[in-house]
Amino acid sequence: MGLSLATAERWVERWERQQQRYAVDREERFTVIADVVEQAVAGCSAEPLILDLGCGPGSLAARLARRLPYAHIVGVDMDPVLLELARTHHADAAHYVDAVIGEDGWTQALRLDRPLDAAVSTTALHYLDPHALRRTYRQLAQLLRPGGVLVNGDHFPSDDTALAELAGCVGRRHAERGQSLAHEDWESWWTAVAADPELADLLAQRRRRQPVSAGDSPKPLSVSAHERLLRQAGFRHVGPVWQYGDSHVVVAIR
C-alpha cells in the first residue's frame, strides 16, 4: 500500500522548514540553479533532459518543474523514505530512480535514452569522498551533451581558515535574522518520522541499507578542490556563479 498524499504533504512541508536551518538563503539558491538551467537549455529543440542528483523528497525537482514544465526531470536518490515522499507529493515533477550515486551501475539504473542537457544537485554531493566524487564527475561528463551543465548548490568551506570563519559567521547571522534556527533540526525531523506508523516499512528499509550517517561524512571540499576535480573530469568552464556565506552555486560546462 502506497503512502497517503496527506502524510507525504505533512512530512515534506516539515522537511522544507527543517532544511532552512542548513542552507543559507535556500530559496535564492534554488532560484539561481533554475536560472542557470533555464539559460543552458534555452536553445534545445527537443524536450530538455535534466538529472537531479540526491533529489531527496523532490524539493529542487519540483521547483525546476514549475520553471521548466516542458522538461523531463529524472531524480535519483538512495533513501527509500525520501524517495517515497517525492513520488507521492511531487509525483508529476520527475521520474524517480532508486540508486546510490557513485556506485557501480548507478548510471545504467537511470535508463537515459539520450545525453543530459543539465545535471543539478543541492546539498547532496558533499557526502562523497574525493575518490568517489572524481569518479562521479567523470561519469556525469560522459552523460552530458557538449555544452551541457552541471550545477551544484552546497556548502563549500574556504581553504583560508580566517575566511571560512567569516563565511560561517555570515551564514549564522543570516539564519538568525530569518529565524531559521527556530525550526526543528535534521535529527528531530527523523525522530518524528520514526514515530509515524505509516512510514515504518520505509524506515525499516532505510535501516537495512545503513546509509552513511552525518558523523561519518567526509570533510567538505573547498570550491577550488571541486573546480580541480571537475576540470580533470573534462569540464571546460568551471566556477561559482553565486555565494552567500559558505553556500555556493558552482557551475561546470561540458
Image: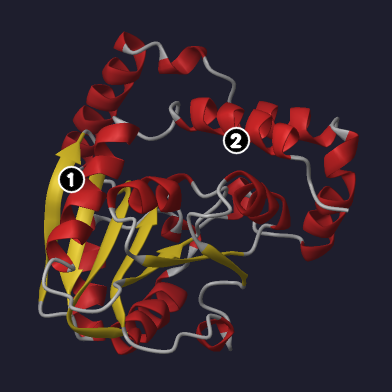
Residue 246 appears in the picture as rendered: no
The tag on residue 160 is 1
Q: Establish if 27 lies above or below 172.
A: below
Residue 73 image position (x, y, % from top left): 42, 65
Q: Establish if 58 lies above or below 172.
A: below
Residue 208 appears in the picture as rendered: yes
The tag on residue 12 is 2
Say how the picture is coloured: secondary structure
Q: Residue at x 83, y 59 (%)?
A: 205
Identity, as a three-letter code, of the amino acid under mark 2? Val
Q: Residue at x 36, y 78 (%)?
A: 134
- Residue in front for this viewpoint, 136 or 26: 26
Asked where in the image residue 175 lies, by quadrant, the reply is top left
Quadrant of the rendering where the C terminus is positioned = bottom left
The answer to whether residue 197 is left or right of residue 147 is: right
Q: Residue at x 60, y 35 (%)?
A: 12
The tag on residue 200 is none
Q: Residues within 10 Å of mark 1 (few under 14, many from 20)?
A: few
- The tag earlier along the polypeptide, 1 or 2, is 2
The answer to whether residue 85 is left or right of residue 93 is: right
Residue 209 image position (x, y, % from top left): 77, 64
Give the alpha-carbon distance from disc 1 to disc 2, as whole Å: 36 Å
Q: Residue at x 25, y 79 (%)?
A: 46
Q: Establish if 233 lies above or below 158.
A: below
Front tag of 1 and 2: 2
Asked where in the image residue 28 lies, by quadrant, the reply is top left
Identity, as a three-letter code, of the amino acid under mark 1? Asp
Residue 17 image position (x, y, % from top left): 51, 25
Q: Label 2, secondary structure: give it.
A: helix
The answer to whether residue 130 is left or right of residue 183 is: left
Residue 241 image position (x, y, % from top left): 11, 51
